[in-house]
Image (tube, helix red, strand yellow):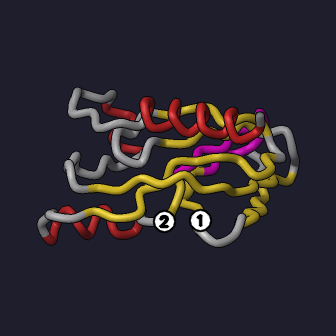
């Protein structure tokens, strides 16, 4: 049963984070640069855990290609499925400079009332579940 749930969660992530060449709001483009949409990329499901101090913060993931956001839940998130860009072929040098820092990482936005918004690229691993401990700063 748990594998079926994980499969459907991964399937929904892939549908939501598919290649999207349509326009995006200016604020989104400013905050989270959009990598070029290329047919030669690989996206994998990874598991991560995110803990915040204080707990109870909302966490969103930016799609690895489309840059659409999906709400993952509130912290602590334990063994959370995320979609991660793991390889890209056929890009020019300028585009690769944008994409390489995002490989094997998940882009997240973390928000909690009374605290500054956290935006970051968190490492992932195919071999283990990485735990990220993030301390939020008061506004």
Residue 76 included in the magenta stretch of the image? no
**Residue 62 in view in this figure:** yes
- Give the extent of the magenta segment: 107-118
**Would residue 42 appear left or right of 7 to someone viewing this image?**
left
Within 10 Å of disc 1 (Cα), the crowding (few <14, some 14-19, many 20+) is many
Within 10 Å of disc 2 (Cα), the crowding (few <14, some 14-19, many 20+) is many
**Residue 117 in view in this figure:** no
| Residue 134 percent across, percent down from the top left | 75, 59
| Residue 110 percent across, percent down from the top left | 66, 44
Residue of label 1: 124
Quarter placement of the C terminus: top right
131 or 13, which lies in front? Answer: 13
Q: Residue at x 81, y 53 (%)?
A: 52
| 139 to 44, vertically: above or below | above
Q: Secondary structure at mark 2?
A: loop
Q: Residue at x 44, y 30 (%)?
A: 16
Callout 1–callout 2 Cβ contact below 8 Å: yes
């Amino acid at each position: 049963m748990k594998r079926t749930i994980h499969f459907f969660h991964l399937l929904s992530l892939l549908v939501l984070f598919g290649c999207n060449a349509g326009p995006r709001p200016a604020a989104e483009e400013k905050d989270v640069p959009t990598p070029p949409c290329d047919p030669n990329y690989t996206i994998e499901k990874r598991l991560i855990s995110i803990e915040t101090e204080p707990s109870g913060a909302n966490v969103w993931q930016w799609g690895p290609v489309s840059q659409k956001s999906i709400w993952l839940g509130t912290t602590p998130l334990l063994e959370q499925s995320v979609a991660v860009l793991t390889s890209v072929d056929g890009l020019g040098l300028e585009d690769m400079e944008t994409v390489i820092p995002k490989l094997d990482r998940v882009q997240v936005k973390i928000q909690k009332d009374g605290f500054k918004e956290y935006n970051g690229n968190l490492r992932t691993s195919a071999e283990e579940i990485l735990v990220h401990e993030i301390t939020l700063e008061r506004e």
